[in-house]
Image (cartoon, rainbow, N blue to C red):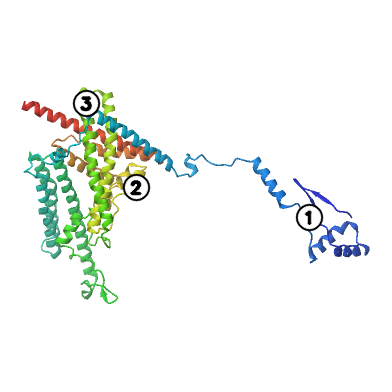
Amino acid sequence: MGDKYERGPLMRRRRTTISDASSSVLNSKHTNGSTPGNTGEESSANHNSSPTKVRDTTTPRKDKSYSDGIKDRLRCHTIQESLLSSASGYSNYRGILNWCVIMLVLSNARLFLENLIKYGILVDPIQVVSLFLKDPYSWPAACLVIASNVFIMAALYTERRLSVGTISEGTGTFLYIINLAAVLIFPSATVLSVTSMTPVGGVFALGIYTVLFLKLYSYKDVNRWSREIRHAKARTLPRSQSCPSVHKANGAAAHAQVIYPGNLTHRDMYYFVFAPTLCYELNFPRSSRIRLRFLMRRLFEMLFFIQLLVGLIQQWMVPTIQNSMKPFRDMDFSRMVERMLKLAVPNHFIWLIFFYWFFHSSMNFVAELMQFGDREFYRDWWNSESVTYFWANWNIPVHKWCLRHFYKPMLRRGVNKWLAQTAVFLLSAFFHEYLVSVPLKMFRLWAFMGMMAQLPLAWFVGRFLRGNYGNAAVWISLIIGQPIAVLMYVHDYYVLHSLEMAGHN
């Protein structure tokens, strides 16, 4: 029996030899009648049971690694997706984003330089003052804002009478209807009748009254809900437990929570009026302290961006709008489209700056100053893949108000979901038109129709577009839709006042 070799696929391996002790045992068994045929089996059994170490004569490990290296050189492809494919799962597009920002800055810098060369410096701070005041001794918009305190006090004292039962719920509802209707009618009648009211001053005053209308409506609802809860508790609790008490914590009074009707104070009312929210609560979430550095940073942003907005409007938008009037008069559609696209860039850029100035800088400044804890004034609307997602996330205070005081109450009354959504868009379209047509003293319904056009657009995007395509559709509607409305109103305002000037001459 000699040494045997086994041939493998890539290398030859020699069978292990047995020790001298094992050989003598096998020889003795062979002489005792064992056949040569079963010698391998016996040797294998004794080899496994023997404690004697076996000498491994296999090929060194470096031969295996060499074989793996050969295999690696033979194979260079695996199943994988391209990075720009959505199936790849790749999401780090920072370089592409930086490239887009650089291209945007360079293209806008060229346009701005072209504007300076063509028109010179048009920024005039004195002209900004004239947008608010025609007469330096007459401040109608400011007087109108001060007069809003009458409606605030009317709501507070109505709630006080309701809390003690002096007036019934029906009478209180009737008084609220009169008060809320006056909040919308009184300022609009004043803007339309006072000749010294400028369009910008009118927009400012009506914007304040619109916010006040939504706040007082929320104030009415929340206090009514609080009365219902109090009456329900009074019916279920024993008389000894119907009076609320201050909870104790570690032997001392904890932070007191306001309980209805303890919220019906001037301090509470005016805190809500100035707070950056439209939805009333008896106990707002409060931050622990005022962060001075954060406050100063927001104040600097407010001052810087408002100056930038005014400068961009005077230097960039006004000349473009003025140059757009002739194509509209001549009904030159190709030039009209060219003017609209040219206006789209500065208009959208100014809108983005306004969003940051108002929803981030200004509202965070007010919230920090008042230690208002809820700072969710917007969500990631820039990632909107549908029109409804955009409108629900770019203005959170208005969205919360619509959801809490308009949309959900309609659903609880059995109104269809689609009809409730349509009603929300109708309400939004009304206020958009109210804030534009009344200050301009002309009614063209462009803003109203623009808002209502969001309904078929939302249906189309939601049904036929998904993902990045839906997001692109939302961005296109924002970039193109606003310049169309701006040009419509400016053209009508220009034509109206041109006819008035011709009539006077």
Q: Amino acid at mark 3?
A: Phe
At mark 2, the secondary structure is loop
Which residue position is annotated with label 3?
Answer: 328
Residue plotted at (68% across, 49% down): 65
Instruction: Residue 448: tell me if it is visible.
Output: no
Query: Is 80 left or right of 167, judged from the image as shown?
Result: right
Proximity of marks 3 and 2: CB atoms separated by less than 8 Å = no
Kindly identify which numbered label has been placed on residue 498. Answer: none
Please give the name of the residue rendered at 43% of the width and 41% of the height, measured from the top-left corner: 95
Horizontally, is 504 left or right of 121 in the view? left
Instruction: Report the amino acid beneath label 1.
Output: Thr
Residues under numbered marks 1 and 2 in contact, where contact means CB atoms less than 8 Å apart: no
Residue at numbered disc 2: 380
Q: Is residue 31 above or below residue 333?
A: below
Instruction: Pinpoint residue 120: horizontal percent, then vertical percent.
Output: 22, 31
Tell us which disc is closer to us: 1 or 2.
1
Residue 439: quarter of image: top left
